[in-house]
Amino acid sequence: MSVPASTAPDSAGGIPAPVEPFVGRQLALSPSRAADFKQCPLKYRLRAIDRIPEPPSRMAVRGTLVHAVLEGLFGLPATERQPARADALIEPAWERLRAERPEIADLVTGGGLAALLDEVRELVRVYFTLEDPTRVDPESIEIFVETELDDGSPLRGIVDRIDRAPNDTLHIVDYKTGRSPAPAYEARALFQLKFYALVMLHTRGVVPAQLRLIYLADAEILTYEPDADELRRFERILSALWAAIDAATRTGDFPPKRGWMCQYCDYKPLCPEFDGTPPPYPHPTESAAAGSATEGVA
């Protein structure tokens, strides 16, 4: 079975896509934006509302290439999903990515490209030690999903892979090019897949039988079996998170939250915690609307 790739309206991660400033675009909650808001509300604002571009990183390029190769692999008939075919997909994936984003060439000058592609080959090689793709039946790959919760909270995201198991149950699979988390952080790592499981429950009325995170850097697989009651509890968490985002969007109040991740943040020059100044908030606030409504009233 070959599975066509799905064209998705939003990036699933990896290299940030070129974006336009906020112009009344409908916001929604995705796993990555939920993580941004919990980590730092200002970071969420600058990414999701101001949509200020971030420079691509070498690590993001590597992750994007690995995902592209695995997506291409599952676009082949099952019997052709062999290591040699996957290896042959790597350089064309790089050429396509470079054509789409010419600026990434600056990340791999000199011998950097050969080293990057070798790292991608190694991660793809590790993948074949963890799964036999000839025995996998993917229902969809790189598929855009969206729904609304019972309270109207909008959810959207991109799922790496949805498999149909031999017993006709559904499994949600996500690839990670980093290392697996320590046991204390596994629940946080599963947030993304619980998010997609909840979307599936709302759109299909089905709880996926298994969630799988495949970590290629250290050849580990994290699996989890959700249930409907747990996903309904998780829904309340997402609803509360979206309510907080909605309130901040209406007021423009997105405070910075200083933490150890700040050292990796591209928005530090715009952050008050580091003597920066954010740009003017691009979305009308409730206070501004109220002021406009009372202008000229005696």
Image (cartoon, rainbow, N blue to C red):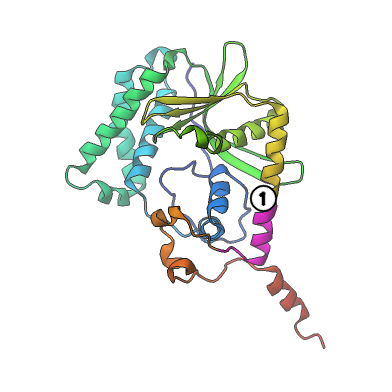
Horizontal and vertical percent position of residue 112:
21, 43
Query: In which quadrant is the C terminus drawn?
Result: bottom right
- Spot the residue most to the bottom: 298
Measuring 61% from the left and 23% from the top, which residue is drawn there? 225
Horizontal arrangement in the rendering, residue 261 relative to residue 149 (left or right): left
Tell me the SS state at disc 1: helix
- Spot the residue most to the front: 184
Q: Nearer the viewer, residue 197 or 203?
A: 197
Q: Is residue 166 above or below residue 140?
A: above
Horizontal arrangement in the rendering, residue 145 relative to residue 13 (left or right): right
The magenta segment is 243-255
- Spot the residue most to the left: 110
Q: Nearer the viewer, residue 121 or 37?
A: 37
Horizontal and vertical percent position of residue 71:
43, 29
Q: Is residue 109 above or below residue 132?
A: below
Magenta-drawn stretch contains 245: yes
Crowdedness near tag 1: few (<14), some (14–19) or many (≥20) residues, C-alpha within 10 Å: many
Horizontal arrangement in the rendering, residue 270 relative to residue 287 (left or right): left
Magenta-drawn stretch contains 178: no
Horizontal and vertical percent position of residue 260:
44, 54
Measuring 64% from the left and 55% from the top, which residue is drawn there? 245
Q: Nearer the viewer, residue 298 or 258?
A: 258
**Tag 1: residue type?**
Trp
Horizontal and vertical percent position of residue 166:
57, 11
Measuring 38% from the left and 29% from the top, which residue is drawn there? 216
